[in-house]
Image (cartoon, rainbow, N blue to C red):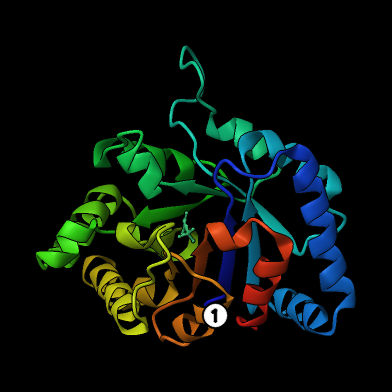
Amino acid sequence: MRTRMIAGNWKMNNNAAVTGEFVKKLEAWLDSDEVGKKSAAAVKDKKIEIVIAPPFTSIGAAVAAKKGSLISLSAQNAYFEPKGAFTGEISLSMIEETGCKYVILGHSERRHIFGETDELLEKKLAATLATKLLPIFCVGELLEDRESGATNDVLTTQLKRVWKNLKGDVVGEKVVIAYEPVWAIGTGKTASNDDAQKACAFIRDLAASDFGRKTADALRILYGGSAKADNSAGILSQPDIDGLLIGGASVAPESFEKIISTAI
Ligand code: PEP
């Protein structure tokens, strides 16, 4: 059984002080609220995993505020080189040192605002898998791709290149894929349950054809794109969707808690 993941990508939101308060509130909810306690039990039973990805400068505050191990931490990006003259970049070992378990790679904002290419992301994914960090690797099509019927071609291109040199057991056990249609990110437009399912099933079939059914069955695939408490239960009910990567609705503890409640 694949452990569901409810992951909050805070982007450039929540400074250190706000992050500390968020973590305290979320842990208090997991410890005292009736649904919160059920969620904590689900984390302990490995039915769900709760992940937050604060900005780099807030990760330390999250670690300092965290009392237990019910919340896992993720970075939002990393550079593949181990050290050197790369002003403004953060290495994977620096992220490991903070106590993060995950790192998000290839988010559409990295691809489309900062120009990250499949070639760069191949290096980032390989470098991540050489560390203890686990990648949450984002893929997804632009609106024009969807409208021209090219969604599956885009997903194929984005995945085949980055995983072509990886072993199936590594992909199945360590990689989390986040299917995030670009037109649904931060726009309030969510993919229909059926469209999200179809894209995630396509990704799973691609993994099956490249690595075999065992890898495909183990691979965790998340949906991301304007997910919120109102639509999360429907998306999570889809057989090939193993969780959510949430931007806007993860920044405040109350809405994030509501989404977690729909995943247990
Ligand atoms: C994201 O940034 O990964 C995301 C899915 O954002 P939002 O939920 O705000 O659309």
Percent position (x, y) of residue 74?
A: 60, 49
Hey, which residue is sitting farthest left in the picture? 148
* Residue at numbered disc 1: 230
Using the image as rendered, state which of residue 253 and residue 63 is in the foreground.
253
Q: Quick one: 146 or 74, which is closer to the camera?
A: 146
**In the displayed structure image, the side of residue 106 where residue 136 appears, left or right:** right
Residue at the spot x=44%, y=26% of the render? 81
The answer to whether residue 33 is above or below residue 81 is: below
Residue 146: percent from left, percent from top: 18, 65
Q: Amino acid at mark 1?
A: Asp
Please name the residue shown 77% across and 45% down the image: 18
Q: Which residue is found at the position 23% from the left and 65% from the top?
A: 210
Q: Along the horizontal axis of the image, is 2 left or right of 165?
A: right
Quarter of the image with the C terminus is bottom right
Residue at (32% x, 56% y) in the render? 182
| Label 1: element kind | helix
Residue sticking out furthest to the front: 188
* Number of callouts: 1
Residue 131, position as x, y percentages in the image:
54, 41
Q: Is residue 28 visible?
A: yes
Query: Residue 110's x, y, as percent?
Result: 39, 40
